[in-house]
Image: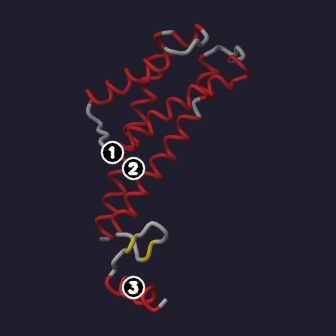
C-alpha cells in the first residue's frame, strides 16, 4: 500500500503517468487532451451536419415518402458519417481541391451502391451532395485550425 501511495505521489509531483494492466496513475499530457477535444468536436459537427441532411433528401425526393419511412435515408447518412469519421481519425484533411474531389467521389460511390429513389440519382442531387461534402471538409479543417490556435496559446 505504501509503495502504491509513493508511486501516486511521485507521479503527481513529476507529472509521470504509470499505466499497468489493472490501473493507471498520473496525468495525461495536455496536448493529448486537446487533440481528443478537437476530434470530438469534429465528430460532433460531422454527425449533426450529416444527419441534418435527411430534410434535404426529402426535399430532393419532391415530397415523396422516402423508402421505409425515411429510415433508409438515415441509414445511408450513417454510412456516410462513418466514412467521415475515418477521415477525421486519419487526421490528414485538407481544403485542397484534389483532396475534396477524391472524397466526393468516395461518397458518391458509397451513395450509388444503395437502391434509392430516381430523384436522388439526378446530376443536380449529386452536385448538392458534392457541395455538402465540401462544406463538411472545409468546416472540419476550420475546426482543427481554430482549436490548434487555442491550444498553441494554452501550451
Single out the mark in the foreground, 2 or 3.
3
Q: Position of residue 36 (x, y in %)?
A: 42, 57
Q: Which residue is drawn at 40% across and 64% down?
A: 33
As measured in the structure, the alpha-carbon distance from the residue carrying label 1 to the one carrying label 2 is: 12 Å
From the viewer's perspective, tell me whether residue 80 is left or right of residue 15.
right
Q: Residue furthest top?
A: 118
**Colouring chosen for the image of the structure:** secondary structure
Tell me where residue 140 sits by quadrant.
Answer: top left
**Sequence-earlier tag: 1 or 2:** 1
- Residue 78 lies in what quarter of the image? top right
- Name which residue lies at 54% across and 41% down: 47
- Per the image, label 2 sits on a secondary structure element best described as helix
Q: Is mark 1 on a helix, strand or loop?
A: loop
The mark nearer the N terminus, 1 or 3, is 3
Mark 3, residue position? 7
From the viewer's perspective, tell me whether residue 10 is left or right of residue 77. Answer: left
Query: In this image, 149 relative to 33: left or right?
Result: left
Q: What separation in Å lies between label 2 and label 3 (alpha carbons)?
A: 38 Å
Q: Which residue occupies 46% across, 29% down?
A: 132
* Mark identifier at residue 113: none
Label 3, secondary structure: give it: helix
- Where does residue 115 sit, x and y in percent of width and height? 58, 12
Q: Residue 143 carries which label?
A: 2
Q: From the viewer's perspective, is the residue at label 1 or at label 2 nearer? A: 1
Q: Are marks 1 and 3 in contact (CB under 8 Å)?
A: no
Question: Which residue position holds label 1?
Answer: 91
Between the C-alphas of marks 1 and 3, the distance is 35 Å
88 above or below 79?
below
Amino acid at each position: 500500500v505504501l509503495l502504491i501511495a509513493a508511486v501516486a505521489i511521485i507521479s503527481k509531483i513529476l507529472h509521470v503517468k504509470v499505466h499497468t494492466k489493472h490501473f493507471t496513475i498520473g496525468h495525461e499530457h495536455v496536448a493529448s487532451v486537446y487533440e481528443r477535444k478537437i476530434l470530438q468536436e469534429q465528430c460532433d459537427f460531422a454527425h449533426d451536419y450529416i444527419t441534418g441532411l435527411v430534410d434535404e433528401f426529402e426535399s430532393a425526393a419532391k415530397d415523396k415518402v422516402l423508402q421505409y419511412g425515411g429510415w433508409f435515408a438515415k441509414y445511408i447518412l450513417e454510412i456516410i458519417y462513418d466514412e467521415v469519421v475515418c477521415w477525421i481519425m486519419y487526421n490528414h484533411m485538407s481544403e485542397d481541391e484534389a483532396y475534396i474531389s477524391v472524397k466526393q467521389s468516395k461518397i458518391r460511390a458509397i451513395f450509388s451502391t444503395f437502391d434509392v429513389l430516381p430523384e436522388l440519382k439526378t446530376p443536380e442531387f449529386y452536385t448538392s451532395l458534392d457541395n455538402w461534402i465540401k462544406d463538411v471538409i472545409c468546416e472540419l479543417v476550420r475546426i482543427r485550425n481554430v482549436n490548434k490556435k487555442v491550444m498553441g496559446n494554452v501550451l
